[in-house]
Image (cartoon, rainbow, N blue to C red):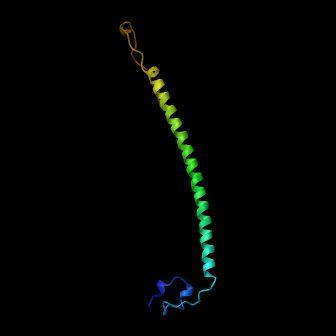
Amino acid sequence: MRGVSDLKGLADMRTALSTHLRSRSRDKGTPYQEVFSFGLEGLRLERELELVAKRQDRVRRRLAETRKVVEARIGQIRGAAPSDSPPAVTGDEQGPSSHLWQTMTVKY
């Protein structure tokens, strides 16, 4: 015997005492209804697959763009590194009047 909390819906109220009896007999059209339901499920899954493919294309394009930007930035860093290095101090500039201080700026 099942309890009231085990019932799936109101239709099961009549069959709470008799577990294998249904309140409504199965129709002959049930196989057609199942075919229709599976057809709708197939259409839904096909649509979902199309959406996933479109999203995958968008993600791949964005990933390619990101990689290009990263490679360009790395190229800029490598190309700009020698010019950003401090100039070498020669023996002539090491006199008392020369300033060995360098200006540093920080971008926020």
**Percent x, y for residue 30?**
61, 81
| Residue positioned most to the bottom | 17
Q: Nearer the viewer, residue 104 or 60?
A: 60
Residue at x 55%, y 51% (from the top left corner): 56
Q: Quadrant of residue 104?
A: top left
**Percent x, y for residue 61?**
57, 44
Residue at x 53%, y 40% (from the top left corner): 66
**Percent x, y for residue 73?**
50, 32
| Residue positioned most to the top | 92
**Percent x, y for residue 32?**
63, 78
Q: Quadrant of residue 9?
A: bottom right
Q: Nearer the viewer, residue 17 or 101?
A: 17
Residue at x 59%, y 68% (from the top left corner): 41
Q: How many marks?
A: 0
Relative vertical location of residue 95 with respect to residue 3 in this rendering, above or below: above
Q: Nearer the viewer, residue 76 or 56?
A: 56
Say whether residue 108 is visible. no
Q: Quadrant of residue 86?
A: top left
Q: The N terminus lies in which quarter of the figure?
A: bottom left
Relative vertical location of residue 50 with respect to residue 83 in this rendering, above or below: below
Is 8 left, or right, of 87 in this rendering? right
Relative vertical location of residue 13 with respect to residue 53 in this rendering, above or below: below
Relative vertical location of residue 82 with respect to residue 96 in this rendering, above or below: below
Say whether residue 85 is visible. yes
